[in-house]
Amino acid sequence: MNKPNRYRVIQSRKTNYSDPIVLKKDETLTIGEEYKEKEIWKGWIWCETPEKKCWVPYQIIEKQDERHGKLKEEYVATELKAYKGDLIKADRELNGWGWVRNINRNEYGWIPLEILEKEDR
């Protein structure tokens, strides 16, 4: 297993989602369009279940056909709030985002890698 990368936040960020979506392993999804606004975020796919809608990294979707798939693992859509100077430990990096722990507040979530600067450690 790779050692988690350590970062420092260089730009504060708030989340717009107060009630993050949690999808279970093997949950069936209707697959939509790929995110296209930022090239560095390529690989996020708009997905829907009967109750939920969110962006999901393509790496965790097992396609069943062109419009349907199921999740290979649990997915939590929590976006992390962070302040400039916070220390971050990234456990996983996908499509321009990291699943991270904010060391200052012991909170977990996704954050764009573009607002982080790698720590030398």
Image (cartoon, rainbow, N blue to C red):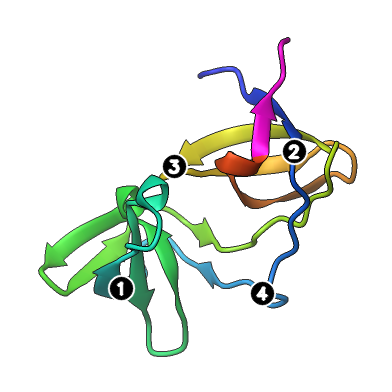
Q: Position of residue 117 (x, y in %)?
A: 67, 29
Which structural element holds mark 2?
A: loop
Residue that extends furthest to the top in the rendered view of this protein: 121
Give the answer, above or below, for where 68 lies relative to 79.
below
Give the answer, above or below, for where 45 lies relative to 41.
below
Give the answer, above or below, for where 46 lies relative to 9.
below
Q: Which mark is first along the chain, 3 or 1?
A: 1
The stretch of residues the image draws in magenta is 116-121
Picture quarter containing residue 62?
Answer: bottom left
Q: Which mark is first along the chain, 3 or 2?
A: 2
- Alpha-carbon distance for marks 2 and 4? 21 Å
Q: Point out which mark residue 17 bears.
A: 4
Q: Nearer the viewer, mark 1 or mark 2?
A: 2
- Alpha-carbon distance for marks 1 and 3? 21 Å
Give the residue at x 31% y 54%.
58
Tally of marks: 4
Name the amino acid, label 2: Ile
The crowding category of the residue bearing disc 1, from other C-alpha atoms within 10 Å (few below 14, some 14 to 19, many at least 20), is many
- Determine whether label 4 and label 1 are within 8 Å by CB: no
Q: Determine which residue is flagged by label 3.
A: 94
Q: Determine which residue is flagged by label 2.
A: 10
